[in-house]
Image (spheres, rainbow, N blue to C red):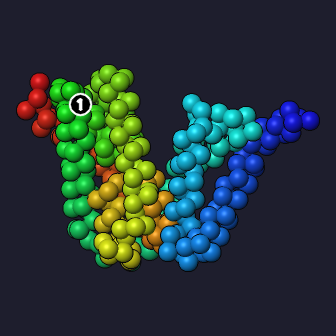
Amino acid sequence: MMNDFIKILDKNGLVFAFLVVGVIMYLSYYVSKKLTKSKIPGAAIAISVGLVIAYFGGEKGVASIPAFSGMALLGGSMLRDFSIVSTALGASFHEIKKTGWVGFIVLVLGTVVAFLVGGSIGYAMGYIDAKSFATIGAGACTFIVGPVTGSALGATSDVIAISIAIGVIKSILVTIATPFVAKRLGIDNPQTAMVFGGLIGSTSGVSAGLAATDVKLVPYGALTATFHTAMGCLLCPSILYFIVQLFLP
């Protein structure tokens, strides 16, 4: 009986995945309202629950369990990228123009700072050659920029894996921390959300963090965070790598 039930869930994995996520979201917002008086956003609680569940999952997370196989598609790159791109539909071009040159400057600044911090961490771990420094530094921009840079430079597989790991850790930290620091940083309007997204990068982390702060800010933060990834893919394997080569073998 149980095996038949699991087979049904496996065949309708995506539908069941939506159901599970919906239940988690409902319960999280209920707990937020009843226990914390909405001081901790429901989305932040839901994200934390998801991270805990993923931690106790198998090699592929909770999708390793047959009944939850649909999570692999729901949480996969296709739907993730579709969600990120679709958020731009909610952005106002009038609000975007208000950011002006500040938006471009924070994009460059955010990319360079993340690159240097990530590369320095890799250097401290013993990866002292230019390719490794650039690859791990690129991973600190986003977990997409890392492997793109590593592949372009011919970095080893372990270095590329580290670059992905550091990008994922950054995404998780941004997701959890954003709701708690948003008010102190003044992230309460489209312009500051765009500056935040461009400076921090990590589209998934920024989107999730802003969703837990104010859903209306998500399109703006996601928009510049996406450009941050593009900027990283452009600068890290080229200009920034050539600069690193001047100081490292």
Kindly tell me whether residue 125 is visible in this rendering: yes
Q: Quadrant of residue 155?
A: top left
Q: Is residue 75 visible?
A: no
Q: Examine the rendered structure and indicate whether residue 54 appears above or below residue 248.
A: below
* 247, 58: nearer the viewer: 58
Badge 1: residue crowd in 10 Å (few <14, some 14–19, many ≥20): few
Residue 79 falls left or right of residue 219: right
Residue at the farthest left position: 246
Residue 176 located left or right of residue 243: right
Give the residue drawn at x 72%, y 46%. Answer: 14
Residue linked to disc 1: 125
Q: Position of residue 183 (x, y in %)?
A: 36, 75
Q: Give the number of callouts.
A: 1
Question: On the rendered image, what quadrant is the C terminus found in?
Answer: top left
Instruction: Check the image and name the residue furthest to the front.
Output: 35
Q: Secondary structure at mark 1?
A: loop
Measured as percent of width and height from the top left, residue 43 is found at 55, 64
Q: Is residue 3 above or below residue 226?
A: above
Say whether residue 227 is left or right of residue 44.
left
Quadrant location, the N terminus: top right
Residue type, label 1: Met
Is 48 in front, or is 69? 48
Q: Is residue 130 left or right of residue 177?
A: left
* Vertical order, 14 against 40 (above or below): above
Q: Which residue is nearer to you in this view: 245 or 213?
A: 213
- Quadrant position of residue 198: bottom left
- Taking the spot 20% from the left edge, 49% from the top edge, the residue there is 112
Residue 193 location in percent, x, y?
A: 37, 69
